[in-house]
Amino acid sequence: MTKINAEGVSASKVFLPANQSHPNLLHFFIAQFPHINPGEWEQRFNDNLILDIEGQPLAANDPYQPNIHLMYFRRLEREPEIPFEEQILFQDEHILVADKPHFLPVTPSGLYLHQTLLNRLKKKTGIPTLSPIHRIDRDTAGLVIFSVNPQERAKYQNLFRDRAVKKVYEAIAPYSEDLITQLPITYQSRLEESKHFLQMQEVEGDPNSDTLIELLEKKAAWARYQLTPGSGKKHQLRCHLNALGIPIKFDQIYPDLTPYQEYDLDFSKPLQLLAKKIIFQDPITGEMHSFCSQRDLEG
């Protein structure tokens, strides 16, 4: 059973093993999750955020019963508010296609729980089994595809693994006379993690990433580029344009990593990168899908 709360947050499951003994459920949760403050578990019980497998709230002093599963909800004291809305472009019994705004994470992590595309869509649709079959960065806007049925998810994910999905991005970056004479080009390099977990870096060795770069239009000192990745490395498009001397407008990671904003976000400078198109053949229905974001970059 998958359960979501009113905010679209899915419950997590925990198993109560037979080789443990606890005076009550509160004692078990405190022992099971030592990195979480005991007072937090007391509050979750008080807020009815600990449930049995049927979805009924449990009390902190309820007895420990081994060999069963319980459900619990994560809780955040404070979370950044993202004042931009996503749009659902397509939905059937197999997939849902969403058009994500800038700044909104796809899935919960760190400071983000309710303010994520996944939880907003679960709340909006009432479908607790929604799961993204690919990701885009929080800073990037555009298309994200979700699987509706868990048993079908792998078939859609395999499309990305097998490079059977054509993804097309747009970006605003500096106009370069030297580069323009070379376009269109397919830029290749080897990308690996850097010393800082937020940044990728180019290293020597056989290429493991490639991006087709084309010019769409010139806008004074800036230009709008079309980017078609052949691979799906982390930050690939941002790294490749930066390596070519044309970092994407308002990029806070390349070439220089700026201090991370936690709560007081500056929404005036969204990264000018957009997941514009996705084209693939549906592995379940056989239908050819071609989706296009309704968003445009500011330029």
Image: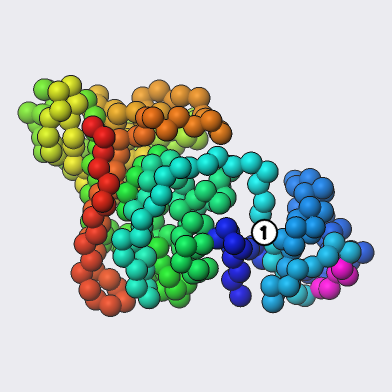
Question: Is 273 rendered above or below residue 154?
Answer: above
- Secondary structure beneath dot 1 equals loop
Q: Please indicate whether residue 189 sits to the left or right of residue 150 in the image.
A: left
User: What residue lies at 47% left-to-right and 62% top-to-bottom?
Assistant: 124
From the viewer's side, name the closer residue of 92 and 35.
Answer: 92
Relative side of 179 to 77, left or right: left
Location of residue 3 (image quadrant): bottom right
The picture quadrant where one finds residue 7 is bottom right
Q: Is residue 294 left or right of residue 23?
A: left
Can residue 123 be seen here?
Answer: yes
Q: How is the image coloured?
A: rainbow
Q: Which residues are magenta?
A: 62-66
Check disc 1 and report the residue beneath it: 73
Nearest the viewer among 294 and 275 is 294
Name the residue: 34% across, 68% down: 91
Q: Name the residue furthest left.
A: 181
Task: Give the quarter of the figure containing the N terminus.
Answer: bottom right
* Residue 69 in view of the camera: no
Task: Inspect the magenta stretch and tell me whether residue 64 lies in it.
Answer: yes
Report the residue at 15% width, 28% height from top: 219
In x, y percent, where is residue 236?
A: 32, 40
Q: Is residue 207 magenta?
A: no
Q: Is residue 26 above or below residue 56?
A: above
Residue at point 30% right, 39% down?
273
| Residue 178: image location, x then y, percent | 12, 23
Amino acid marked by disc 1: Phe
Q: In the drawing, does residue 73 fall left or right of residue 287? A: right
